[in-house]
Image: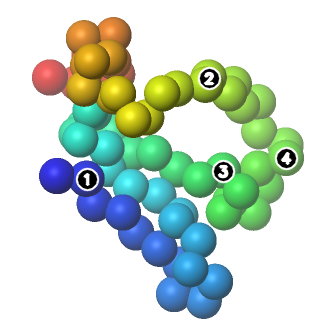
Amino acid sequence: MARHLFCSTCGAKAFYRPRSNPDGWSVNARCLDEYVALDLRVEPFDGRDWEAHGPSLAHLSRA
């Protein structure tokens, strides 16, 4: 089960542990103090059909 964690001040989703990658975390970069200075790569993803993409996400998990 995914566990979403929200900011108690503004309500933004700060981060969560995805069901598709239970060993990892999804972090909302805009919640970081210095996100503009980070070298981030944005990869569009169809979250609605994430289960169909499970095998292609397996490399993100330590298991």
Quadrant containing the C terminus in the rendered view: top left
User: Where does residue 11 sit, x and y in percent of width and height?
Assistant: 56, 80
Q: Residue at x 71, y 56 (%)?
A: 30
Of pointers 1 and 4, the one earlier in the residue sequence = 1
Q: Amino acid at mark 3?
A: Ala
Of pointers 3 and 1, the one earlier in the residue sequence = 1
Q: Which residue is mark 1?
A: 2
Disc 2 from disc 1: Cα separation: 20 Å
User: Where does residue 9 sit, x and y in percent of width and height?
Assistant: 60, 89
In the depicted structure, whether residue 37 falls above or below residue 20? below
Q: Which residue is mark 2?
A: 43
Left or right: 43 with respect to 23? right
Instruction: Return the mark for residue 29.
Output: 3
Disc 1 from disc 4: Cα separation: 27 Å
User: Where does residue 27 sit, x and y in percent of width and height?
Assistant: 52, 50
Label 4 packing within 10 angstroms: few (<14), some (14-19), many (20+): few
- The residue nearer to you, when weighing 36 against 44, is 44
Q: Quadrant of residue 55?
A: top left
Disc 3 from disc 1: Cα separation: 18 Å
Q: Amino acid at mark 1?
A: Ala
User: Where does residue 43 sit, x and y in percent of width and height?
Assistant: 62, 23
In the depicted structure, whether residue 29 falls above or below residue 47? below
Instruction: Return the mark for residue 36.
Output: 4
Of pointers 2 and 1, the one earlier in the residue sequence = 1
Q: Amino acid at mark 4?
A: Val
Label 2 packing within 10 angstroms: few (<14), some (14-19), many (20+): few
